[in-house]
Amino acid sequence: MTAAHSSPMNPLLQGTITSPIVESRSWVENVTFSEDMPLINVSQAAPVDPPPAPMRQALAEAVSNDVSAHLYGPVLGLPELRESVARHCSATYGGTISTGNVGITSGCNQAFCAAISSLAGPGDAVILPAPWYFNHKMWLDMAGIECRVLMCGDDMLPDPQQAAAMIDERVKAIVLVTPNNPTGLEYPDGLVTAFYQLAQQKKISLIIDETYRDFHSASGAPHSLFSDPDWSDTLIQLYSFSKAYRLTGHRVGAIVCSQSRMAEVEKFLDTLTICPNQLGQRGALFGMRHLGNWLARERAEILDRANAMREGFPQLDGWELKGCGAYFAYVSHPFEAPSDQVAKALVEKAAVLPLPGTMFSPRHGEGGTGHAERHMRIAFANVDRAGIDGLFARLAAFSM
């Protein structure tokens, strides 16, 4: 027999980390959890419940009666949905966003990939604050784009002045996520505006991912960037319908940008998926038209769970709550071991599955400042108040 021949592999893809969600699932595969202590899974923020019944009924009717729901549609999405997003953004932010500024994507991750692909290629650079959303870092690595890491301070907020010092001719964009994943923090309008003005000055783009916008604690616009009549020269906004309407499996997101950039985004989307998921788009449109009160109740519940995290955290000796909001709490642990070891021990000893900071920041000595080893993300959106009390009890009793 001849030796097996290995076909070539893309070194950029090989050099990209395994998805933290995929990796963390492997930690629980061979662990048996007791009935007295079932697993508390705080690793992922995706809703675990289906969409509300009225939306499911509307989707069922579309499956049965709407032939176009089963066919190719426009690359940039249903015109009615694009128009609804444009109207909603204009009303929310007090700016002028037209239908031509909106593209519907197969989830917000694809919106990010499309935005980056319209901006940068191999050898270019993008500034990404750390702790980062890991799929953002993964796409930059896959695409051969340098990720310039902007380490946040102890307050978990990125510093525009530090970012300014990192910008040269290779930098094409700065990325912000607010409310933030993984920290949960809502970036103040003044901070977002400072980054926007920096991007304007340097003639680069500001990408702002607002996946968790619907769970912002303040009423009114989260920022004022769209009030600038020239916003489209600098700003690219990303959004997800997955969290608002429990449409995770249907993959529906949105990108808001200049019409000239949208023409480039359209090429990218046409090559990847041809069109967004037709049923998912109809679900998103139904949600925008009919589920405002339902979403308000969902928001109130998530904000109450965030308050439960803040209220209960002082009982944990040595632990510190560094950020909390939307779906996430970002915490520091009191142990000498790095966070990835602590996270695995929590699975085995306490039946708790968080994600370690090593999945959101470079390690110490690899450009990090120790954040990775000290911190963890707790995604509490799928845990009610009783479950949060149980989580605190297990964390309080846990030792390495």
Image (cartoon, rainbow, N blue to C red):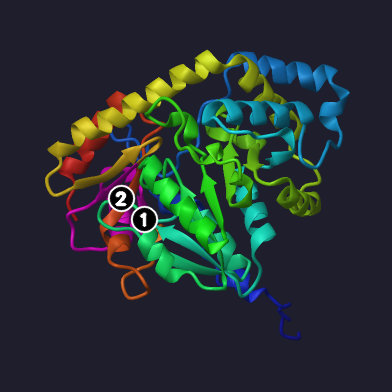
Residue type at numbered disc 1: Pro
Give the image location of residue 141, x and y in percent.
Answer: 56, 67
Is residue 260 or residue 308 the one in the foreground? 260
**Residue 199 shown left or right of residue 42 in the figure:** right
Task: Look at the image and say whether residue 348 sits in the magenta stretch.
Answer: yes
Res. 181 in view: no
Which stretch is magenta? Answer: 329-357
Quadrant where the N terminus lies?
bottom right
Q: Which residue is at 78% across, 20% downward? A: 62
Residue under label 2: 348
Counting residues from the start of the chain, the first of labels 2 and 1 encountered is 1
Q: Are marks 2 and 1 in contact (CB under 8 Å)?
A: no
Q: Mark 2: which secondary structure?
A: helix
Residue sitting farthest toward the bottom: 2
| Residue 351 figure quarter | top left
Residue under label 1: 158
Determine whether 49 is above or below 37 in the image. Answer: above
Give the image location of residue 237, x and y in percent.
Answer: 58, 44
Residue type at numbered disc 2: Glu
Q: Which residue is at 65% across, 30% downward? A: 85
Give the image location of residue 34, x and y in percent.
Answer: 32, 37
Tell me the mark number nearer the camera, choosing from 2 and 1: 1
How many residues crowd around disc 1 within 10 Å: few (fewer than 14), some, or many (20 or more)?
many
How many residues crowd around disc 2 within 10 Å: few (fewer than 14), some, or many (20 or more)?
some
Q: Which residue is at 69% across, 58% downward? A: 118
Determine whether 208 is above or below 242 in the image. Answer: below
Q: Mark 1: which secondary structure?
A: loop
Give the image location of residue 146, x and y in percent.
Answer: 54, 71
